[in-house]
Image: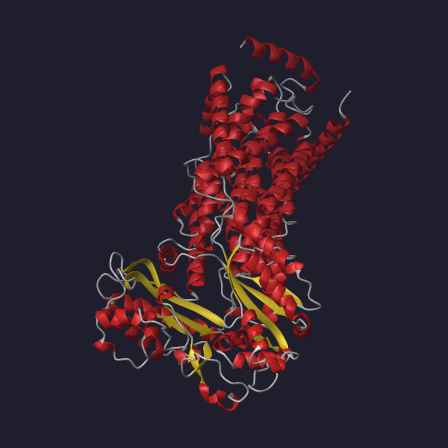
């Protein structure tokens, strides 16, 4: 009695075969109508490009929509938009010292250059563009009587541009020409040093990096590095969507800031040619990261047309012969045109659905090229395999071709579609959008190859029948093509190669070699997976030789971070009722010494002021706050830690306006990886949630937290998507292949390919990150194609298992190999890419092609030779039929035992 599932599945397959036979004939009868229909469909979809939008904000790409970080960052962008832009110059003297008069003089001249230059378009200078701080005109060392001093406060403060450098140790009007080594060292080692810029205490160690040497008395005499920093301002009210920093930094910036930063970068780069001997500088202006990362991705994306050209040459060679009539350059061009229309349809349709285009989406054309070329080779292989079944009726030949090819490309396209559709359910916005774009593209390339390429194939068959030239169809050759014996199967060179290849791998020695090789690869894959790390650094998006990447390397070498600095925002609470809750929160952070090194807060100083010179305001927090902020050095320093509703301003002697937010900072310990920083993040959240405020909200914010939030979910999301994808691959292939054993073998090949892929990723220097996770999802869609084509063809051929495995390799092996090779050469130009996106793409796709082809073309035929399922009841009647399966199986088992 037949399995009901098998009966249902075979009905599905037979129904698809009948449909594609009918569809192929219809397209062959009206090829020009089919071509026109495809053009109209693409044109209609392209209208959706009017809604095309890109998304480069890292917070909106890689952090789950339901994350606390997203909600908190959105609140800050709306209520307290960013104000400061960070620009830095690291100055080093490898093997020497930056504490020498000539360099200090040079740095002062550079500072003056930065202060004096103007932008070309808007004539902006540093004074207009800098972030300003109100600072006292003199060094504040004692408490200021309050409120008696209020009338003089205005005259005591002045706005000063926020910049940091070792030059702060000298007055701005200092004559640096008289500076010598002795006076330099005396100045930086002076007791109770104050910044001449901000009138606040400073420590020379904070301005030096690398190796620092001291004399026997403990005074600093040399240091390898120092820095200069300029903090620009952002006019948040002038920011437009076009001004948002590109390439995923997540920063918002106005056009004036971008213009000034561009000019600053030019000044700093020009200065590099004037540096004193043995001095190096490393530049990082605020816009550098986005400029370099974006330019790198765009430059590599420009390799796509070259990749298409290389694929075109390869496809032309593989599809035809080197004769005037049998070369098929125009057909190859038609196949690539299908992919071009697919890209156009996908971009337009997805834009119409309001799906954003992110940095990862640049690989979509390469992906569609690989899948489309694979489908094209399958169709052509099925056409060439007709052999003696070919007739003089082109429509019948196309119908028979599509009867086999249509089911084959349906199996792979549907599994690919489901894999990406499931990826579209992820919580990571960038991965979700990418997978949905791919899902649409896969359906589109499937339709265009089955329709448009079939139409082109029909026209090419007509051309061949008329003996017209392959490049110039208008020219008909006088000498007619010799009559071909259609009863004779003329194998191509690639088929002959696979014929010899099958004899080896299906022999006993060959099977042993294949199994041993497969086990060896699997062992290496498992070993690599054990050591595969989850790690991501945004610096990877930068070319290692770029100026900003060199700055990050120098910063890590000379000014290594002690840990991530976090800002705790206290928003819209009842300050009178909950001030003690703020103290409780501060105390809990101070007690968390396992994850926090230092807490920097105004709270303790405020409480001291409350019990001393501001005790008259003990019961009125707004009055207490004004008193504190205007009566001591600590208060002056804390003024920037409070913001007021509707932009209200502090006035000395008057209660503070309604408070929008207060903030303080703490510094994490330095963590080695996700196993440390994710628990630390969760503990910070637990500490905050453990303090119950009567109203308002409290949340931590640090740029690195965005990466930590992603790290926390990326592995689970990857495992979830891979698990669901593999399950759906099995179910889909089970229905379309109509055989449970065949589906298990396909699933086995996919699983082995994934294990090898993930393992050898480690050996190639890759980690689990947002980029590699996307590529692993793509890998599932690609590697299933190779095995599914082999298994499907095996099921359609009658005979013994050895005969069917050998014939499968001859019939479909060249198409599968050509599909893999064309996929590889499409992106081989990315091998030397400086972009982390494209270099990861190349490495992972290379591994997918190698392992996918090995498991599909080498290991799977051996497995099918040993334990493959029986053929469909509609298999080639010249071979054994389905009812003989049991006897065939018994005979082959005996045959294997004899070997």
Residue 179 to residue 802: above or below: below
Residue 869 to residue 132: above or below: above
Asked if residue 191 lies left or right of residue 697, the reply is left
Q: Nearer the viewer, residue 482 or 592?
A: 592
Horizontal and vertical percent position of residue 507: 50, 16
Q: How many marks?
A: 0
Let me know if residue 504 appears in the view: yes
* Coloring basis for residues: secondary structure
| Residue at the outermost top position | 898
| Residue at the outermost front position | 612
Q: Which residue occupies 75% across, 31% down?
A: 8
Q: Nearer the viewer, residue 437 or 650?
A: 650
Q: Nearer the viewer, residue 313 or 124?
A: 124
Hey, which quadrant is residue 801 in on the image? top right
Residue 691 to residue 118: above or below: above
Let me know if residue 341 appears in the view: no
Asked if residue 764 lies left or right of residue 734, the reply is left
Horizontal and vertical percent position of residue 300: 43, 53
Q: Which residue occupies 67% across, 25% down?
A: 872
Hey, which quadrant is residue 324 in on the image? top left
Horizontal and vertical percent position of residue 91: 31, 64
Q: Nearer the viewer, residue 176 or 181?
A: 181
Asked if residue 458 lies left or right of residue 180, the reply is right
Hey, which quadrant is residue 18 in on the image? top right
Figure quadrant of the N terminus: top right
Horizontal and vertical percent position of residue 769: 52, 48
Q: Which residue occupies 66% across, 40% down?
A: 23
Residue 593 to residue 369: above or below: below
């Amino acid at each position: 009695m037949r399995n009901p599932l098998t009966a249902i599945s075979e009905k599905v397959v037979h129904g698809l075969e009948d449909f594609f036979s009918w569809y192929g004939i219809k397209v062959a009868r009206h090829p020009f109508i089919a071509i026109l229909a495809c053009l109209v469909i693409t044109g209609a979809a392209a209208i959706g490009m009017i809604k095309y939008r890109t998304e480069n904000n890292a917070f909106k790409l890689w952090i789950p929509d339901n994350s606390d970080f997203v909600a908190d960052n959105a609140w800050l962008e709306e209520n307290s938009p960013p104000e400061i832009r960070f620009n830095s110059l690291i100055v080093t003297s490898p093997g020497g010292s930056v504490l020498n008069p000539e360099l200090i003089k040079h740095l002062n001249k550079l500072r003056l250059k930065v202060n004096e230059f103007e932008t070309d378009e808007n004539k902006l200078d540093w004074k207009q563009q800098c972030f300003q701080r109100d600072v006292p005109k003199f060094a504040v060392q004692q408490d200021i009587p309050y409120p008696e001093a209020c009338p003089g406060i205005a005259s005591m403060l002045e706005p000063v541009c926020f910049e940091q450098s070792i030059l702060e140790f000298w007055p701005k009007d200092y004559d640096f020409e008289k500076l010598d080594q002795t006076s330099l060292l005396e100045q930086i080692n002076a007791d109770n040093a104050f910044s001449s810029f901000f009138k606040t205490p400073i420590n020379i160690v904070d301005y030096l990096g690398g190796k620092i040497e001291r004399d026997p008395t403990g005074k600093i005499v040399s240091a390898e590095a120092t820095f200069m920093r300029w903090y620009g301002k952002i006019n948040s009210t002038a920011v437009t969507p076009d001004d948002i920093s590109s390439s995923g930094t997540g920063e918002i910036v106005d056009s004036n800031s971008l213009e000034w930063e561009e000019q600053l970068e030019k000044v700093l780069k020009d200065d590099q040619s004037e540096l004193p001997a043995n001095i190096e500088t490393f530049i990082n202006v605020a816009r550098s990261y986005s400029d370099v990362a974006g330019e790198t991705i765009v430059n590599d994306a420009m390799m796509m047309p070259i990749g298409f050209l290389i694929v075109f040459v390869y496809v032309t060679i593989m599809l035809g012969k080197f004769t005037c009539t049998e070369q098929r350059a125009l057909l190859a061009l038609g196949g690539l045109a299908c992919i071009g229309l697919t890209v156009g349809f996908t971009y337009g349709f997805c834009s119409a659905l309001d799906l954003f285009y992110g940095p990862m989406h640049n690989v979509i054309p390469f992906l569609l090229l690989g899948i489309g070329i694979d489908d094209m080779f399958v169709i052509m292989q099925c056409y060439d395999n007709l052999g003696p079944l070919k007739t003089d009726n082109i429509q019948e030949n196309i119908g028979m071709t599509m009867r086999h090819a249509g089911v084959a490309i349906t199996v792979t396209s549907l599994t690919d579609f489901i894999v990406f559709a499931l990826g579209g359910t992820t919580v990571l916005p960038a991965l979700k959008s990418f997978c949905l774009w791919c899902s649409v593209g896969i359906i589109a390339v499937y339709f265009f190859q089955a329709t448009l390429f079939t139409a082109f194939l029909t026209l090419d068959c007509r051309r061949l029948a008329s003996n017209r030239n392959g490049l110039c169809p208008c020219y008909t050759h006088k000498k007619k093509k010799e009559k071909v014996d259609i009863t004779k199967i003329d194998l191509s060179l690639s088929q002959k190669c696979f014929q010899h290849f099958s004899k080896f791998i299906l022999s006993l020695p060959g099977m042993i070699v294949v199994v041993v090789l497969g086990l060896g690869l699997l062992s290496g894959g498992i070993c690599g997976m054990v050591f595969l790390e989850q790690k991501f650094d945004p610096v990877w998006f930068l070319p290692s030789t770029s100026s900003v990447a060199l700055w990050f390397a120098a910063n890590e070498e000379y000014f290594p971070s002690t840990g991530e600095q976090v800002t705790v925002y206290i928003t819209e609470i009842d300050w009178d009722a909950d001030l003690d809750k703020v103290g409780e929160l501060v105390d809990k952070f101070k007690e968390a010494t396992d994850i926090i090194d230092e807490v920097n807060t105004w709270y303790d100083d405020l409480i001291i002021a409350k019990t001393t010179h501001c005790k008259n305001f003990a019961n009125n927090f707004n009055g207490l706050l004004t008193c504190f902020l205007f009566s001591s050095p600590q208060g002056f320093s804390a003024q920037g830690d409070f913001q007021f509703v509707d932009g209200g301003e502090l006035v000395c002697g008057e209660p503070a306006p309604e408070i929008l937010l207060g903030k303080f900072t703490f510094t994490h310990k330095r963590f080695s990886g996700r196993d440390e920083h994710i628990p630390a993040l969760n503990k910070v959240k637990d500490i905050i949630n453990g303090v119950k405020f009567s109203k308002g909200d409290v949340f931590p914010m640090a740029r690195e937290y965005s990466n930590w939030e992603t790290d926390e979910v990326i592995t689970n999301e990857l495992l979830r998507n891979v698990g669901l994808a593999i399950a759906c691959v099995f179910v889909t292939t089970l229905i379309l292949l109509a055989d449970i054993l065949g589906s298990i073998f396909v699933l086995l090949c996919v699983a082995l390919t994934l294990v090898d892929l993930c393992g050898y990723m480690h050996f190639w220097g890759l980690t689990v990150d947002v980029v590699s996770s996307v590529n692993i999802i793509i890998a599932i869609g690609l590697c299933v194609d190779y095995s599914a084509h082999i298994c499907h063809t095996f099921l359609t051929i009658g005979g013994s298992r050895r005969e069917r495995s050998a014939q499968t390799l001859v019939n479909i092996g060249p198409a599968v190999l050509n599909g893999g090779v064309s996929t590889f050469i499409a992106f081989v130009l990315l091998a030397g890419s400086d972009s982390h996106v494209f270099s990861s793409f190349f490495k992972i796709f290379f591994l997918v092609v190698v392992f996918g082809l090995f498991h599909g073309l080498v290991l799977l035929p051996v497995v099918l030779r040993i334990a493959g399922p029986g053929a469909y009841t509609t298999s080639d009647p010249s071979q054994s039929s389905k009812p003989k399966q049991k006897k065939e199986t018994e005979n082959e088992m005996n045959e294997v035992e004899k070997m």
